[in-house]
Amino acid sequence: MQEESSPTSLRELAVLFTKLGFTAFGGPAAHVAMLHDEVVTRRGWMTEQHFLDLVGSTNLIPGPNSTEMMMHTGKEQGGWKGLFIAGACFILPAATMVTILAWAYVTYGRTPQGESLLYAVKPVVVVIILSALIKLGRKAIKNWLLAAIGIAIFALYLGGINELVLLFSTAVFMLLLTFVKRQYKAALIVPPFFHLPAPLLSLAESSLVNLWQLFLVFFKTGAVLYGSGYVLLAFLRNDLVQRLGWMTDQQLIDAVAIGQLTPGPVLTTATFVGYFLAGVPGATVATLGIFLPSFIFVAILNPLVPRMRDSEWTAALLDGVNVAALGLMAGVSLILGRAALVDIPTVILALVTAILVFRFKVSTIWLVLGAAVIGLILSVVR
């Protein structure tokens, strides 16, 4: 992969990730699927295997994994400048939209409704995720053991087991299996499950809202956050509602809802909270705080991923984590499908999208934009 990039390639990165920032609805699984379509299927910037390795390794670090995947791609195509450009261009569109919605919330006491838009976009997103799953699964499932792990992760996730327990248990299982194979030429059957230690970071108590403390709250959250937007809600509630008393539960729920309504990373919830508490400076500081750890983690991790594939030990770990990540993606797609395919029009949208994706190879960006237009039209005619 190249370390230096020409201005033209940097511009291409900026255009691509800005487009994704404006169109990547549906959460991390959808973001990864859209990124795969753009950088593996359409541009051939990396192989299926390397993309899978990035997905697997990124799932092992804190922060918004799909945003970190954008940063990885930027780093590999445009060096350190590319890492920053990809991350910033993916984050800024959502952060800008959330700031506008936060202004409407503060000014009018409510946020514009987006139910019709999401009604049309969700079925399209489900098909996009399934398309990426099929392509990545062909590369990730190398033998019966990896297939069994992927199916088990899918079932356990739907059964309510925490995704972090599943990912880290799979990593430990693959390392132990490699050790046993090397030492005893035998196979380990039952993977261990364990609970992750609680984060040890804490902030000094204060009753005043100031930009430095706001930055620290979100920097801490970005540095230790694993999991979904619901996990983010738990982290922020502990700091902003219970400990500092800066927001009410309802205000925090509204903030998380806006982060999920807009395209791009769900962590732009921080932008909403920052604006609510301290206007545009607060939005800027909170956004910087929650995403800065991801830039740091990706900068450290990216050079290590190829070396991980070259080692027998870490290659086995990556293989296990890759299929675990795909199992989680499959579980998420099933849950999204139940929520998205609610009537005949949404089923028709999904079927048309499947034809456009699998038969005509239409870009996922155009599919999401088309669904968004349909949703907006429905919001007017209803």
Image (cartoon, helix red, strand yellow):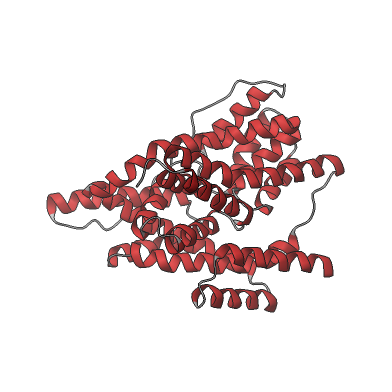
Q: Is residue 198 above or below residue 157?
A: above
In the image, farthest residue toward the left: 184
Residue situated in front as seen by the camera: 226 or 270: 270
Q: Is residue 172 left or right of residue 115?
A: left
Q: Residue at position x 58%, y 24% from top?
A: 203
Q: Position of residue 23 (x, y in %)?
A: 62, 57
Q: Position of residue 320 (x, y in %)?
A: 33, 55
Q: To which quarter of the image does residue 377 belong?
A: bottom right
Q: Residue at position x 46%, y 63% from top?
A: 42
Residue 56 visible here: yes
Q: Position of residue 148 (x, y in %)?
A: 34, 65
Q: Is residue 283 above or below residue 257?
A: above
Q: Is residue 139 above or below residue 103?
A: below
Q: Is residue 347 left or right of residue 4?
A: right
Residue situated in front as seen by the camera: 216 or 227: 216
Q: Position of residue 160 (x, y in %)?
A: 51, 57
In the image, farthest residue toward the right: 108
Residue situated in front as seen by the camera: 229 or 64: 64
Q: Residue at position x 73%, y 35% from top?
A: 275
Q: Is residue 181 left or right of residue 372?
A: left
Q: Residue at position x 21%, y 49% from top?
A: 312
